[in-house]
Amino acid sequence: MLKNKICQLLNIKYPILQGGMAWVATAELAAAVSNAGGLGIIGAGHMPPDALKAEIAKAKNLTNKPFGVNIMLMSPFVKEVMQVVIDERVAVVTTGAGNPGEYIPALKEVGTKIIPVVASVALAKRLERVGIDAIIAEGMESGGHVGEVTTMALVPLVADAVSVPVIAAGGIGDARGVVAALALGAQGVQMGTVFAASAECTAHPNYKAAIIKAKERATVVTGAITGHPVRVIANKLTRDFAELEKCGASTEELERLGAGKLKAAVRDGDVDYGSVMIGQVAGMITTIRPVNEIMQDIVQHIPEVMTELSQKI
Ligand code: TUI
């Protein structure tokens, strides 16, 4: 993978990024993925700046490899957490759920690589003009906040529209998914769900057990009405949500029902009334394994998948 553009850009062994999942992607998980040769990413979510600073310090203690921070642009602390990653000279910033354009000059000034997540070709094109280093095209198979286009359609469209390297995300769960992403025009992949189901992931055992239990139709997308659609495992919360939607509840009422529910699922283990955000590939995960084993399983199977592919065509 020495010639791979993402490996060169990020100074990593494999072009595999771990999704920056809020409440799930702690320093422990990010460091484990970086130590395994990928790019681990701390999910800042709605973290206040001091908490992120502590998480970055922890990651620096656990790995001497590069790692990243994902910044949720809907966070009330977005400006302050951007300043933290600048002060801490974090190697890579990925962004989600918005347009990071205004923060790019300051990040570039300290040499932080900036890789926004997009769910549309239009935003990919707009961001390319403001100097991003690569782009993550995330299909709606992903967990959490999602767009409306599948990975299969989005990745080649984005790859044709921009000249920066494209990283595919959403619906990638094994070596077959990685090879498929490369075939679609991506130079690398981002995977969240597979790493959420790892031994090093510090999420509550109930949350991890829910991933193992999930089949391919376990998740639903709720909240399209509020303008913030999220993919979660169907449970009592999603049923209450659907009821409220049917009764014509306001966006505020719906958002109030969702508030704090991701933390409830991930940290407190409330998988009935919590927001169990996870991608569709949860259906292919059957065991909790160490990050290094997950990574090696994926990278070692890539040549096999490619050989099989060349024999088919
Ligand atoms: O951001 C994500 N996934 C997330 S964020 C999250 S935390 C959360 N908590 C409660 C409610 C909602 C979210 C959980 N999962 N993925 C990256 C992503 N970004 N997917 C889609 C987008 C996106 C969507 C619209 C990016 C930009 C955008 O439009 C911005 C514009 O200006 O066009």
Image (tube, rainbow, N blue to C red):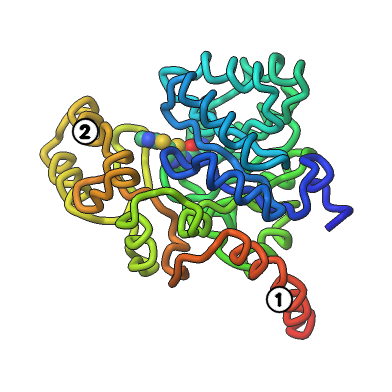
Query: In terms of secondary structure, where does tag 1 sit?
Result: helix
Question: In the structure shown, which secondary structural element does the residue marked by tag 2 occupy?
Answer: helix
The residue lying at 61 percent from left, 45 percent from top is 31
63 and 85: which is toward the camera: 63
Can you say which quadrant of the picture contains the C terminus? bottom right
Choose between 292 and 61: the one closer to the eye: 61
Labels in figure, total: 2
| Residue 259 percent across, percent down from the top left | 26, 32
Q: Residue furthest right?
A: 3
Q: Nearer the viewer, mark 1 or mark 2?
A: 1
Q: Quadrant of the N terminus?
A: bottom right
Image coords of residue 19 (percent x, y): 55, 46
The residue lying at 52 percent from left, 51 percent from top is 192
Asked whether, in this view, residue 24 is left or right of residue 120, the answer is left
Left/right placement of residue 289 relative to residue 94 reads left
Q: Is residue 131 above or below residue 21?
A: above
Identity of the residue drawn at 65% across and 53% down: 189
Determine whether 243 is above or below 111 in the image: below
Q: What amino acid is at disc 1? A: Val
Q: Residues within 10 Å of mark 2 (few under 14, many from 20)?
A: some
- Find residue 42 and report its horizontal and vertical position in percent: 55, 37
Q: Is residue 214 left or right of residue 308?
A: left
Tag 2 residue:
254
Write down the quadrant of residue 137 in the picture.
Answer: top right
Q: CA distance from mark 1 to mark 2?
A: 44 Å
Mark 1 or 2, nearer chain start: 2
Few, some or many residues within 10 Å of mark 1 (<14, 14–19, 20+): some
Kind of residue indicated by mark 2: Leu
Residue 2, picture quadrant: bottom right
Relative image position of residue 121 (x, y in whole percent): 62, 39
Q: Which residue is mark 1?
A: 305
